[in-house]
Image: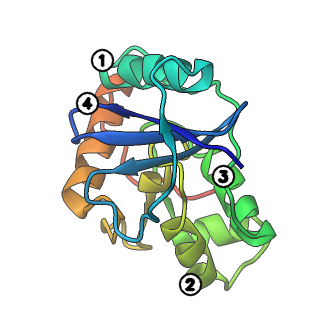
Amino acid sequence: MKLYTTTLKSPVGPLRLYANEGALTAIYLENHKGAPVLEASERESHPVLREARRQLEEYFAGERVSFELPLEPIGTSFQQTVWKALREIPLGRTWSYAGLARHIGREGASRAVGSANARNPISIIVPCHRVVGTNGKLTGYAGGVPTKQWLLEHEQRIQGRAGGPSDAP
């Protein structure tokens, strides 16, 4: 599969965006733990990358609350289920790992959910930063806990409220 890439400067540091012919496949932060080395051609003019840049710039400017992009993250079917559920967490809110596990019908699978969450290849757009410990504590984030905290605070500013933890429905 041919991949294309571009870099976006952001308030949380440079983001490396990747896409195949028709969908976004990854967004990695500068110091992203576990990010694979991907072979990709630099292509700022790629339509999916161009649209992803535009929507991310709007998000960072506080003008966008959701993303509308074709996504094709590569992962197991369980990971895909977790990543799909992450997109259901409302902007400015958080769910616990246990709450996310309940939401996907896998109560008691908090650790597996955490592992899938940690392997999310599409940072920010698939909002793994919105998952916290059961006590509301900010736990690990591939881009670092300070980045996770910045993203959550940014989203709360966008929403205009101090949204504390709210567990999955």
Q: Report how far apart the C-alphas of labels 3 and 1 lie in the structure.
A: 25 Å
Pointer 4 residue: 9
Q: Report how far apart the C-alphas of labels 3 and 2 lie in the structure.
A: 21 Å
First in sequence: mark 2 vs mark 4: 4
Pointer 3 residue: 73
First in sequence: mark 4 vs mark 1: 4
First in sequence: mark 3 vs mark 1: 1
Q: Secondary structure at mark 4?
A: loop
Kind of residue at disc 1: Ala
Residue 108, how many percent across, how many down?
A: 67, 85
Residue 169, how many percent across, how many down?
A: 67, 54
Q: Secondary structure at mark 1?
A: loop
Please report the residue visible at 61 percent of the width from the left and 74 percent of the height from the top: 113
Quadrant for residue 68, please give it.
Answer: top right
First in sequence: mark 4 vs mark 3: 4
Q: Nearer the viewer, mark 3 or mark 1?
A: 3
Q: Report how far apart the C-alphas of labels 4 and 3 lie in the structure.
A: 22 Å
Visible in this render: residue 87? yes
Q: Report how far apart the C-alphas of labels 2 and 4 lie in the structure.
A: 33 Å
Residue 125, how many percent across, how many down?
A: 52, 39
In the image, residue 151 sits, relative to residue 64, either above or below, namely below
Please report the residue visible at 65 percent of the width from the left and 27 percent of the height from the top: 69
Pointer 1 residue: 61
First in sequence: mark 3 vs mark 2: 3
Q: Nearer the viewer, mark 2 or mark 4?
A: 4
In the image, residue 35 sits, relative to residue 115, either above or below, namely above
Q: Secondary structure at mark 2?
A: helix
Pointer 2 residue: 111
Q: Are marks 3 and 1 in contact (CB under 8 Å)?
A: no
Kind of residue at disc 4: Lys
